[in-house]
Image (spheres, rainbow, N blue to C red):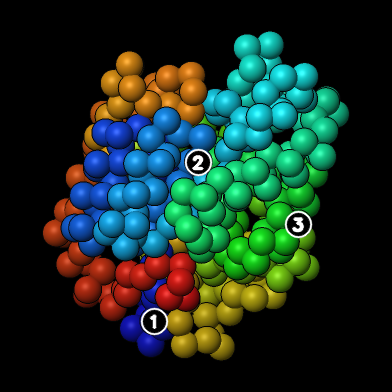
């Protein structure tokens, strides 16, 4: 990595408010300097307590917009709504994608729910989100991305996430079925970048997080992703070719998406229907340990990488 190009690294802890045990781990990571930002699930069972923790410890906080897991925030959408199933909960990570492909989602309801989540975020935190992204990357899905962009502009939310990771396809350790989902996310994100740009929405120059999820988070993999991120523009596939140009800028901004925390227990957590398998697994604790590892922080220091929040970009 070039020493002449200053790196600003935002490390975001997603799913804040999903579970008290997860929240405790995320706060510990913040105190240890392992993460710099959190992303709040306002329909998570511990959302109110998580917002209070962020206020108490001055943790920079954004909104993790959720259209795929749990119960809608907007009460009007909790019955007879295209976003939910017959049990009254969102359709799931793959279910929402299937419904969208079949033309069964009403975009007016998408807008209504996203706006309700922004308003609840304001009530819980006393501020607008410093950034807003999508749980399970729903914010870059076709049609939904336009509604998402409109909501960000209406509420003056400046930053989002565009999940395209340089070098992802070289990561042979990612299981093929997982990689297939990631390819879909990248394709959607590529088609989203110009839309977000047209609305004046900003995002970090580089995204990292797909290759380092769960068990795949290692110091080596984070280093590899950071090294790829600073390759010359003509060697990289990035969502912001007109905006991202390390050769003409003094710094590069990067977001590392993470999911640390103590594993959830079956009776506690989730967004109204209990915690998912990933939240209950050892992988959350694994991420927390890697992010706090002194060897990783020595690497940051050696490479002159400055950890910061979205508000510092």
Labels 3 and 1: the sequence-earlier one: 1
How far apart are the alpha carbons under marks 2 and 1?
34 Å
The front one of 240 and 156 is 156
Q: Quick check: can you spot residue 200?
A: yes
Q: Residues within 10 Å of mark 2 (few under 14, many from 20)?
A: many
Q: Residues within 10 Å of mark 1 (few under 14, many from 20)?
A: some
Labels 2 and 1: the sequence-earlier one: 1
Q: Residue at x 60, y 50 (%)?
A: 118
Q: Which residue matches tag 2? A: 42
**Disc sitting over residue 150 in the figure:** 3
Q: In the rendered view of the protein, which quadrant contains the N terminus?
A: bottom left
Q: Quadrant of residue 241?
A: bottom right
The front one of 179 and 42 is 42
Q: Residue at x 68, y 16 (%)?
A: 85
Give above or below for 294 relative to 121.
Answer: below
Image location (x, y in percent) of residue 235:
56, 68
In the image: residue 266, left or right of residue 98: left
Q: Quick check: can you spot residue 193?
A: no
């Amino acid at each position: 990595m070039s020493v002449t190009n200053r790196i600003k690294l935002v490390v975001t802890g997603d799913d804040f408010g999903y579970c008290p045990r997860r929240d405790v781990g995320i706060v510990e990571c913040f105190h240890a300097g392992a993460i710099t930002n959190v992303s709040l699930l306002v329909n998570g069972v511990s959302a109110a307590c998580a917002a209070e923790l962020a206020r108490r410890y001055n943790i920079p906080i954004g909104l993790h917009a959720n259209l795929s897991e749990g119960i809608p925030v907007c009460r009007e959408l909790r019955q007879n709504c295209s976003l939910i199933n017959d049990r009254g909960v969102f359709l799931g990570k793959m279910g929402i994608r299937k419904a969208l492909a079949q033309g069964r989602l009403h975009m007016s309801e998408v807008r209504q729910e996203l706006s309700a989540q922004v308003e609840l975020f304001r009530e819980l935190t006393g501020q607008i989100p410093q950034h807003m992204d999508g749980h399970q990357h729903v914010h870059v899905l076709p049609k939904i991305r336009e509604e998402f962009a409109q909501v960000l502009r209406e509420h003056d939310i400046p930053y989002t996430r565009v999940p395209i990771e340089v070098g992802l396809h070289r990561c042979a350790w990612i299981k093929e079925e997982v990689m297939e989902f990631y390819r879909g996310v990248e394709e959607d994100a590529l088609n989203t970048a110009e839309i977000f740009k047209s609305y004046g929405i900003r995002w970090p120059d580089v995204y990292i997080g797909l290759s380092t999820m769960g068990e795949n988070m290692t110091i080596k993999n984070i280093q590899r992703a950071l090294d790829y991120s600073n390759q010359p523009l003509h060697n990289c596939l990035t969502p912001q070719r007109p905006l991202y140009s390390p050769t003409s800028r003094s710094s590069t901004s990067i977001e590392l998406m993470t999911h640390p925390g103590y594993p959830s227990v079956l009776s506690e957590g989730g967004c109204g229907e209990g915690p998912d398998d990933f939240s209950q697994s050892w992988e959350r604790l694994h991420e927390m340990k890697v992010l706090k590892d002194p060897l990783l922080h020595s690497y940051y220091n050696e490479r002159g990488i400055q950890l910061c929040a979205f508000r510092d970009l």
